[in-house]
Image (cartoon, helix red, strand yellow):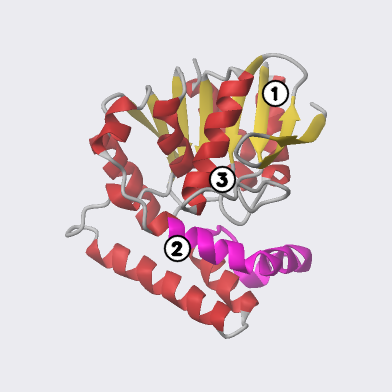
Amino acid sequence: MAARQSEIVQTGFGQVEVHRWGPGGRPLVLLHAAATGPKAYAPLAERLAEAGWQCLVPALHGYGNSRVPGAATAVEAHAAIAIWLAEVSGARALVGHSMGGLAGLLAAPSVALDRLVLFEPILFDALDPEADADLIAAEAEMAAAMQRHLADGRDEDAVRVFVEVWNDTPWADLPEAARARLTAQAAGVVADTQATGGVTIAPEIWTAAPPTTLIHGDRSPEIARRMVAGAMRHLPRAAVTPLSGVGHMGPLMRTGPVAEAILAALP
């Protein structure tokens, strides 16, 4: 088992908490999803480290001890962390999950990457406004409900709505400690949901992306699969890897097949 090391780094743009698995090997940046954090990715990071990679997992803005005070939006702050870590580590490959996939795509043109691996990135701008109208409306309704619950002081309800849509496990089936942790993050989860929904991806972001592998599971929400399909239309050098029996939280809950798919995609 690869040992985890962590540090808090003061940068020119803010403070970043970084977790590292694997003492050597080629550096690989891994960006986490909303409502999670670096420690949740320990099983996946260990698998990647055992395969010879040094897996670097930053806490994104607002998570752990990472703070980027000057960023215009949370998503820009997440991308700034990704750019910084790829540059200082010399990483030539980046893996992003969900919100981390969006941050990775936005960061990619600013760093020298040989490969981008995105597990169901949150890419609303890749959806078809007409063909995906019902899915877009349902997601907007979910985000509005989260905002209402948070404003009314019902933090648990705010994150419950999110989990019921995006998680593989119903809220009631989550361990009490997990529900408490998520409830404590309610404000950040709502903010990330609002921020990711408003991102427009410039054409040059798509065209400048390095060779990209998009991974999706057949148990994920339909909107996640539609985002992957839309990204395939925009990315000039992309391949898709479907996984059976895997949902949106596959990197945390189905580590084995997800790790195999990531390793197969890496250069």
User: CA gap, disc 2 to disc 1?
Assistant: 33 Å
Image coordinates of residue 161 in percent, x first then y, are 52, 72
Q: In this view, does 161 lie above or below 39?
A: below
Q: Which amino acid does label 1 sit on?
A: Ala
Q: Which of marks 1 and 3 is in front?
A: 1
Lower sequence index among marks 2 and 1:
1
Q: Check the image and report above or below for 221 versus 103.
A: below
* In-front residue for pair 87/168: 87
Instruction: Give the Cα separation between the discs numbered 1 and 3.
Output: 18 Å
The correct choice, above or below, for 250 with respect to 156 in the image is above
- Camera-side residue: 29 or 70? 70
Q: Nearer the viewer, mark 2 or mark 3?
A: 2
Residue at coordinates 73% horizontally, 48% vertically from top-left?
A: 65
Q: Name the residue under label 2.
A: 194
Give the CA distance from mark 2 to mark 3.
23 Å
Q: Name the residue under label 3.
A: 250
**Magenta highlight range:** 166-195
In the picture, the quarter occupied by the N terminus is top right
Tell me where residue 210 appears, x and y as whole percent. 38, 23
